Amino acid sequence: MSALTIYPEQQPGQGDTRTEFAAIQNQLSAIGVQFERWSANCELAADADQTAVLAAYSDSIDRLKQQYQFQSVDVISLNPDHPDKAAFRQKFLAEHTHADFEVRFFIEGRGLFYLHVGNKVYAVLCEQGDLISVPANTTHWFDMGENPQFKCIRLFTTPDGWVADFSGSDIAQAFPTLDQYVTALS
């Protein structure tokens, strides 16, 4: 289940949560964030490689490529056995921005994006089938959890791919981790 919680930036315990797709989409649209649901053109094997994944979602990818002139597309995957999972998690947990807008489509698993916009923090739980596009220069962070399990398509308008400008803020430490957030939703 996808979810959105909007917090006052100084009160991480005072969030307002929505789980209805249309309500999530409307709230995120108001801050310039695209949130969609995609489905594959065909069935995917559990061990599908990047070529098979990109082919399965080619119609949606092609539409976005034309709309935003994406120059590169790849597939990233992380599982609980990955030897560098803790290092990756710490890197993405630090608040940052990108000159490019960040687009992620979750093929499998889930992740928690936090968007720090104005005096609010938007926690967006993305799960299989969700696409999120975070506008350029939007302060945010991402939590994949202690035992990550996800596969995502990433789209970039620059050939450099993922390049972050870290804010140096420790705000992310005040908000629930993915694991805490999911437990609280249950």
Image: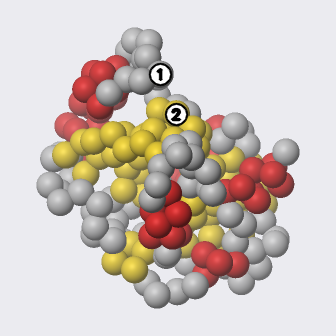
* On screen, residue 102 above or below 96: above
Q: Nearer the viewer, residue 181 or 86?
A: 86
| Residue 10 drawn at (x, y percent) | 71, 83
Q: Which residue is mark 1?
A: 46
Residue closest to the far top: 42
> Residue shown at 46%/55% (left/top)?
83
| Residue 92 drawn at (x, y percent) | 47, 66
Q: Mark 1: which secondary structure?
A: loop
| Residue 118 drawn at (x, y percent) | 55, 78
* On screen, residue 142 above or below 128: below
- Identify the amino acid type marked 1: Ala
What label does residue 88 carry, if any?
A: none
Q: Mark 2: which secondary structure?
A: strand
Residue 119 visible from this viewpoint: no
Residue 61 visible from this viewpoint: yes
* Crowding near the residue tagged with mark 1, few <14, some 14–19, many ≥20 C-alpha atoms within 10 Å: few
Q: Which residue is mark 2?
A: 108
| Residue 134 drawn at (x, y percent) | 43, 58
> Residue shown at 83%/54% (left/top)?
184
Image quadrant in which you'd find residue 126: top right
Query: Which-is-in-front pick, marks 1 and 2?
Result: 1
* On screen, residue 41 above or below 143: above
Mark 1 or mark 2: name the one nearer the start of the chain: 1
- Identify the amino acid type marked 2: Glu
Q: Nearer the viewer, residue 104 or 120?
A: 104
> Residue shown at 40%/80% (left/top)?
166
Q: Is residue 13 left or right of residue 174?
A: right
